[in-house]
Image (cartoon, rainbow, N blue to C red):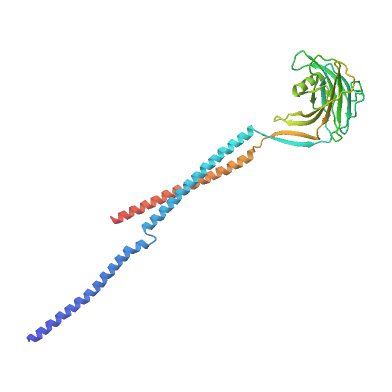
Amino acid sequence: MNRQETSSSYQELSEDVEHADANLEPAEEQVDKEDLDDASSTILPILDSNSPSVRFSKSCLKNVFSVILLFIYLLLMAVAVFLVYQTIADFRDKLKHPVMSVSYKEVPSYDAPGIALYPGKAELLTCKHHLHNYIPPLVNPGQPGEIECTTQRINYTDPFANGTKKFAVIVEGPRDVKQQELVFMQFYLNETDQDFSAIDYLLFSSFQDFLESPNKPDFMKACESSYSSWKFSSGFRTWVKMSLVKTKEEDGRETVEFRQEISVVNYIERRAKASGDQLFFVVFEWKDPFIQEVQDIVTANAWNMIAILCGIFLALFKAADFAKLSVKWMIKIRKRHLQRRTQALNHIS
């Protein structure tokens, strides 16, 4: 009896131990799985691209890049503002300082200029037109000869000295520039009470205008006020080569100016000298067939300036728009980051 009870109790105890071991194995397996899950949960977020740290680094880089772009566009806006100022300043400067445009117009012949001579006590002996730049030798120097030129004699009041009368001999100048037409004149002065002997002259643009003028004294007074006077001396042959310059003023008026190249050649006296006798020789010829035309041109073009300003302002608006969008995007990214941080803190708490 006792042996049977002992064997039965031992069998029951062994069954209980086996049952307990069987229950422990699944528990240990469950604990190991939970530990692995915890370990994986602690390691995997570091490698996940959607983790908060990775997102923060990307947003930081984007913020830095957007700030750099913002500064670049601010610099471009400053450059654009400077270009606007410089463009307007250049336009105003060009309006105040027009550029002189010079062009040359070739003509077969000129309008005959007027040659106003003020001989004083001197006498006009000869006046002839010659071609091909050739002056024949003088036959009877100091003696009256042929006067083949169209001349007018006139008295008028000096515009610079009121009440002073002036006597002028107006001679028609050369026309044909291709055949090198010239006008040769000889004057004679018997007596002089001056240390130096010279005859004044001036050139005006059109001898025909002088002939058609209803008031020739006033015409000559206006010419003397507008043109420069020159001199040629006795005992020499003065060769005057003329060139014509036409200048167009800003108000549309056109002015004419004569430029001269003067060469002087000594006259070799061959006649028996008389006390106080003086001879004057002067030649007038065109220098070349080109009329110089001068005109002031304003190089500032309002349309070009408007186009430049439109392009600059368009760039400014684009830059301002981009800067505004960049700032909005930065504020939005900052708000998202603060919201995620707040959510993370709430989750931890």
Q: Can residue 332 be seen in the rendering of this structure? A: yes
> Does 295 sit left or right of 64 as displayed?
right
Report the side of 221 relative to 274 (left or right). left
In the depicted view, which residue is nearer to us: 103 or 326?
103
Q: Quadrant of residue 126?
A: top right
Return the residue nearer the eye: 262 or 212: 262
Residue in view at x 41 percent, y 54 percent: 59
Of residue 183 and residue 270, the one placed in the foreground of this image is 270
From what the image shows, is residue 234 above or below residue 322?
above
Q: Position of residue 284 (x, y in %)?
A: 83, 28
Provide residue 153's location: percent of width, then percent of height: 85, 19
Residue at image coords 41%, 48%: 331
Q: Position of residue 347 (x, y in %)?
A: 30, 56
Residue 146: x and y, percent?
92, 23
Compared with residue 25, is residue 64 higher up or lower down, i.e. above or below?
Answer: above
Q: Residue 165 sits in which quadrant?
A: top right
The correct choice, above or below, for 311 with respect to 345 in the image is above
The answer to whether residue 209 is seen in the rendering is no
Looking at the picture, tell me which residue is in the foreground, 146 or 204: 146
Q: Is residue 117 left or right of residue 69?
A: right
